[in-house]
Amino acid sequence: MDQVYPIPDAKAQSDYRNYDKPTRDTVREFYRQNHQNQTYAFVQQKRDEFLRLDRRQILESLLEPSKTIAPEYRTHVAVTEDGRSVIGLVVKQTADTVALVNAAGRLTELAPAAIDALEPLPTSLMPEHLLRDLTAGQAADLLAYLETLK
């Protein structure tokens, strides 16, 4: 007999995740972006953007992450009119909203009229000294692994 998933009557309909009305806006935005962007062309574009570094550039980015920061990875700070600072990658900027994602993955959307300043920061979100606690062999293995991702 073939098994059916979900198993009929195993859970109430209300126990399943509601993708149309998620409880948090960040969940809705995550799914929206995934469904909008997950095309073959989008994946190939991101692959080309993310995997364009050669061995020297990969090593340099590990040793000095803030030396060269690609525009899509440039961290910004948004200072709001009420004095709050929001730091993250700008993932959306329209006439209606500026959206930043911080290092923990938290999405913050701001109305452009509520922003006093939006400035790029000189430092990368990638932490400094990533190789400090690795042996030379481990660092070489990490570099070799990162090269295989191309």
Image (cartoon, rainbow, N blue to C red):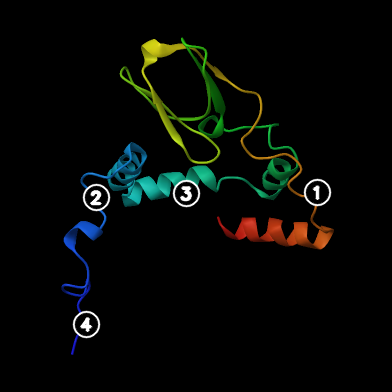
| Mark 2 crowd level (few <14, some 14–19, many ≥20, 10 Å Cα) | few
Q: Compare residues 145 and 54 and report the one nearer the observer.
A: 145
Binning the other alpha carbons within 10 Å of mark 4 as few (below 14), some (14 to 19) or many (20 upward) gives few
Which residue bears the numbered disc 4?
3
Q: Earlier in the sequence, mark 2 or mark 1?
A: 2
Q: Secondary structure at mark 1?
A: loop
Q: Nearer the viewer, residue 103 or 22?
A: 22
CB under 8 Å between discs 3 and 2: no
* Left or right for 124, reference 80: right
Tell me where residue 14 appears, x and y as whole percent.
Answer: 20, 57
Vertical comparison of 58 with 68: above or below: below
Q: Residue at x 65, y 61 (%)?
A: 145
Disc 3 to disc 4: CB gap under 8 Å: no
Residue labelled with disc 1:
132
Dot in front, 2 or 1? 2
Q: Amino acid at mark 2?
A: Tyr
- Residue placed farthest to the right in the image? 136
Query: What residue is pinned by disc 2?
Result: 19
Distance in Å between CA atoms under marks 4 and 2: 24 Å
Q: Which circle, 3 or 4, is nearer the viewer? A: 4
Residue 8 versus residue 132: which sits nearer the camera?
8
Where, quadrant-wise, is the N terminus in this rendering?
bottom left
Disc 2 is placed on an element classified as loop
What whole-number distance in Å separates the C-alpha atoms at marks 3 and 1? 28 Å
- Residue 143 in the image: state x and y as whole percent: 70, 56
